[in-house]
Amino acid sequence: MGPNPVIQAAIDLTAGAAAGTACVLAGQPFDTAKVKMQTFPNMYKGLMDCALKTYRQGGLRSFYMGTSPALMANIAENSVLFMCYGFCRQVVRTIGGLDKNVMLSDLQNAAAGSVASVFSSIVLCPTELVKCRLQAMHEMQISGKIAQGQNTVWSVVKVIVHSEGLLGFYQGLSSTLFREMPGYFFFFGGYELSRSFFATGLKSKDELGPLPLMLSGGFGGAALWLAVYPIDCVKSRIQVLSMAGKQAGFMKTFASIVRHEGISALYSGLKPTMIRAFPANGALFLAYEYSRKIMMNHFDT
């Protein structure tokens, strides 16, 4: 018999926080390149050009601009995501008339993850907004869209509060939701499908070792980004360019990108994103599964 629902929720919340931390530490430099290439694609010829120019801005430190809000964003998002994922899986069992401990199918897990992402988006959007603005700060300054001296978390937060109010932190919320729901369907679906593949011949997917777990996490992350990357590109544009007072909705921004830059602009930064998908999401699921297992064993004994 497992822990009661309250303790189970706390375990999922804590394991999600560990997962979010591992994800950022493993993938932040690639995420910085992704945001820069999404928001200012004409400034960079490709990933290597972006990496070299970013390094010249301030060394290795430049790749970690926005790490503090990125940690906040990922810890907040994944804590809520995995806690709600646990709740949603129980809801799926209840609707299907299943025992509370029965293993769900890969499709059922994918559906639970998709619904859980609605709740995580609410806590993700404000912190991701600050992160994206910090990551593209250099490009915004040299292009003349904003003044110098706005390159700290606190300065970005103050500008948002003074110029846009508290609701300004939710610039791009609809785009975030539009990205998260289908994205996490493929994320959890791809992860569980991959685990099922590696678990062939084993009694349970819980018996998988670190390498299959990391590969499964990487596969889930790759599936997510391939499915929703253009949506993420539009979201990044909305969140970063609204810093210069350009207020535009999803469809208007999407149409503007396609009309003036072509469809290929929606995939700017895809290469660093796909490279990042495996180490970042591999670390995410490895941290989640092992921290969750340790805590579950503790409360079972």
Image (tube, rainbow, N blue to C red):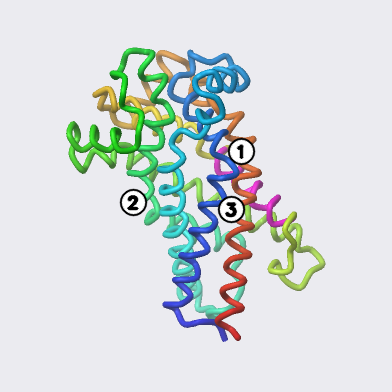
- Main secondary structure found in the magenta portion: helix
Which labelled disc corresponds to residue 284? Answer: 3
Q: Is residue 214 among what the camera can see?
A: yes
Which three-letter amino acid code belongs to the residue tagged 2?
Ile
In what element is the residue under mark 3? helix
Disc 2 packing (10 Å; few <14; some 14–19; many ≥20): some
Give the CA distance from mark 3 to mark 2.
20 Å
C-beta proximity under 8 Å, tags 3 and 2: no
Residue 157 is a magenta residue:
no
**In this figure, which residue is indicated by the disc labeled 2?**
122
Q: CA distance from mark 3 to mark 1?
A: 12 Å
Residues at circles 3 and 1 in contact by the CB criterion of under 8 Å: no
Residue at point 37%, 56% (across, down): 119
User: For the residue carrying disc 3, how many other residues have a C-alpha within 10 Å: few (<14), some (14-19), or many (20+)?
Assistant: many
Q: Earlier in the sequence, mark 3 or mark 1?
A: 1
Disc 3 marks a residue whose amino acid type is Leu
How far apart are the two marked residues, 2 and 1, measured between alpha carbons?
Answer: 24 Å
The quadrant of the image that shows the N terminus is bottom right
Find the magenta span and give its range. Answer: 212-225
Q: Amino acid at mark 1?
A: Arg
According to the image, label 1 marks what residue?
Answer: 276
Counting from the top left corner in percent of width and height, residue 123 is at 35, 51
Residue at the spot 58% in from the left edge and 76% down from the top edge: 296
Q: Are marks 2 and 1 in contact (CB under 8 Å)?
A: no
In-front residue for pair 71/245: 71
Is 143 rendered above or below residue 160? above
